[in-house]
Image (cartoon, rainbow, N blue to C red):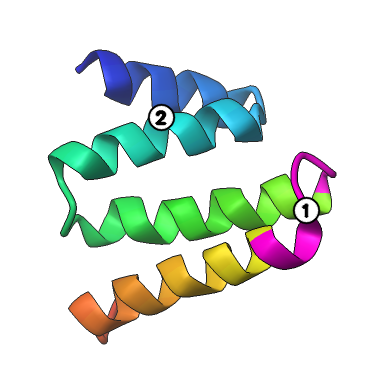
């Protein structure tokens, strides 16, 4: 529950690097959680556009997370 709270706080504060770290930790525990994968893709996109990482590399990682989510649940999000 502590990670869930940290994720909510970081998303609310637009603290994308912290949200990224928190999501990566959560995915270790729940690696097939489609919602977490999709959210990580969105957070990575925000990391890239706000200059908190090398844009090309981070955007590629975001794309990969979106693709993982869609492979696991082709109708997500509906």
The residue that disc 1 covers is: 54
Residue at the (18%, 52%) spot, across then down = 31
| Residue 21 within the magenta-colored segment of the rendering | no
The residue that disc 2 covers is: 22
Label 2, label 1: how far apart the Cα atoms are: 19 Å
Name the element at disc 1: loop
x and y percentages locating residue 71 in the rendered image: 26, 83
Please name the predominant secondary structure of the magenta segment in the image.
Answer: loop
Name the element at disc 2: helix
x and y percentages locating residue 59 in the rendered image: 67, 66
Q: Which mark is residue 26?
A: none
Label 2 Cα neighbours within 10 Å, binned few <14 / some 14-19 / many ≥20: many
Q: Which comes sooner in the sequence, label 2 or label 1?
A: 2
Q: Can residue 78 be seen at all in this image of the molecule?
A: no
Which part of the image, by quadrant, shows the C terminus? bottom left
Examine the image and state in which quarter residue 70 appears.
Answer: bottom left
Q: Is residue 5 above or below residue 42?
A: above
Q: Which residues are magenta?
A: 50-57
Residue at the (15%, 45%) spot, across then down = 30
Residue at the (65%, 58%) spot, across then down = 58
x and y percentages locating residue 12 in the rendered image: 58, 26
Examine the image and state in which quarter residue 77 appears.
Answer: bottom left
In the displayed structure, does residue 56 sit left or right of residue 3? right
Given the current orientation, which residue lies at the most extreme top position? Answer: 2
In the displayed structure, does residue 41 sit left or right of residue 51? left
In the displayed structure, does residue 43 sit left or right of residue 8? right
């Amino acid at each position: 529950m502590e990670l869930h709270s940290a994720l909510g706080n970081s998303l609310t504060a637009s603290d994308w690097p912290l949200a990224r770290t928190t999501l990566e930790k959560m995915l270790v525990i729940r690696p097939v959680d489609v919602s977490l994968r999709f959210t990580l893709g969105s957070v990575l996109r925000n990391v890239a556009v706000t200059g908190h990482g090398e844009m090309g590399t981070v955007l590629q990682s975001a794309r990969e997370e979106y693709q993982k989510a869609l492979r696991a649940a082709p109708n997500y999000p509906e």
